[in-house]
Amino acid sequence: GWGWWARIKDRYVELIFGFYPNEAYWRPNLTFVLMLSALAPILFPVLPRKMLLLSLAYPALAYWLLWGGSIWSPALIMLGLGLAFVVFVKVSESRNAILGGALTIGHFLVWFFVILGPLSAGISALVPIGLAPVESEMFGGFMLSVIIGVTGITASLPLGILLALGRKSDMPFLKTICVGFIEFIRGVPLITLLFVASVLLNLFLPPGTSFDIILRVVVMVTLFASAYLAEVVRGGLAGLPKGQHEAANALGFDYWKSMRLIILPQALKISIPAIVSTFIGLFKDTTLVSIIGLFDPIGLAKAIRADTDWNGIVWELYVFIAAIFFIFCYSMSRYSMYLEQKLETENR
């Protein structure tokens, strides 16, 4: 019968939320709903473009809802990233990309290491808006997997595109850096990078510096996925006929304009199956964090099996976990098929 479901029913909340405070479950639930709302206009262009404002604000909102504290720190971080992007685009269009990159890095360092702290403290003192803080040790279950997976997927795609363009660049210094990064990351197992994030990274930071463990893992997962995506995108770029580049030159487009309007859209279209396969692999690889002490669903399953009340419970837990992962991964696969069919229809 369905007696096995009682075993899941007793612990499903723990498998979803980990050790997150019971009274604050509304925060990850709201974050998940907002995530779907923020992704919707990106995945389905027929939706109103005004919804993209939520997409831009979502990272700061999600961080604030999940970790709590003052809302002004994540808001100012997003503002700093937005200003850095504007600086890069404006300077690159009017002068050159190297100067734009240098000014962007300078702005980034000044904003995050000089301005951010005092400005956030000042605004928080004047307008105290915040939620009760929640430590990263309380995170777990599928909530942790979704945080790491979605953040890694979202951040790795643009970084992978930049790495692919850097690898095909005519500037020897930039090309060497990108090739070295890609080959090093692809030659190292993800679990090794996670151990570096968990154990070794703090050794290279100044004494007293606190670097959140989940943030460290997200950074390493993003770097790992971006190296693989860079090769996928490079394959798409190599698959385009030279006539596309010649057509962009004939129209008088500069490098960035030709890439944005002609080359990259076609290269990414060719690469959709491989990109989605990388995303699915990345989402499944989030279970590796159980090896470094984070309680993702697999880590929680081990803890539940250690409870004497649930001796002998093995397959029920793992079938439940597998079913949830299947739903996420199958959804990504179906969306990629929908996107391919949509693009084929538009180009007929």
Image: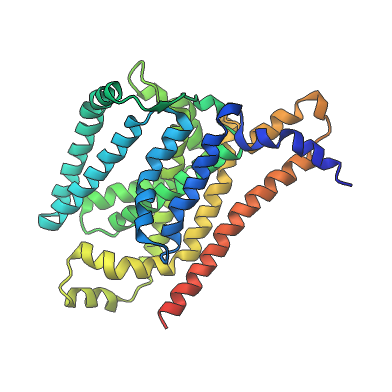
Tag count = 0
* Colour option used: rainbow
Please state which of residues 150 and 224 is positioned toward the viewer in this rendering: 150
Image coordinates for residue 266, horizontal then vertical, percent: 36, 70
Location of the C terminus (image quadrant): bottom left
**Could you tell whether 165 is left or right of 271 in the image?**
left
102 to 198, vertically: above or below: below
Q: Hey, which residue is sitting farthest right in the picture?
A: 1
Please state which of residues 277 and 175 is positioned toward the viewer in this rendering: 277
Image coordinates for residue 252, horizontal then vertical, percent: 15, 73
Q: Quadrant of residue 12?
A: top right
**Could you tell whether 246 is left or right of 213 in the image?**
left
Q: Hey, which residue is sitting farthest top in the picture?
A: 208
234 to 53, vertically: above or below: below
Q: Is residue 249 visible?
A: yes
Q: Is residue 296 visible?
A: no
Q: Hey, which residue is sitting farthest front in the picture?
A: 127
Image coordinates for residue 208, horizontal then vertical, percent: 36, 16
Please state which of residues 174 and 295 is positioned toward the viewer in this rendering: 295
- Residue beneath the point at 19% across and 53% down: 89
Image coordinates for residue 33, horizontal then vertical, percent: 52, 46
- Residue beneath the point at 44% across and 28% down: 68
Q: Quadrant of residue 111?
A: top left
Q: Hey, which residue is sitting farthest bottom in the picture?
A: 348
- Residue beneath the point at 41% across and 68% down: 269
**Could you tell whether 132 is left or right of 5 in the image?**
left
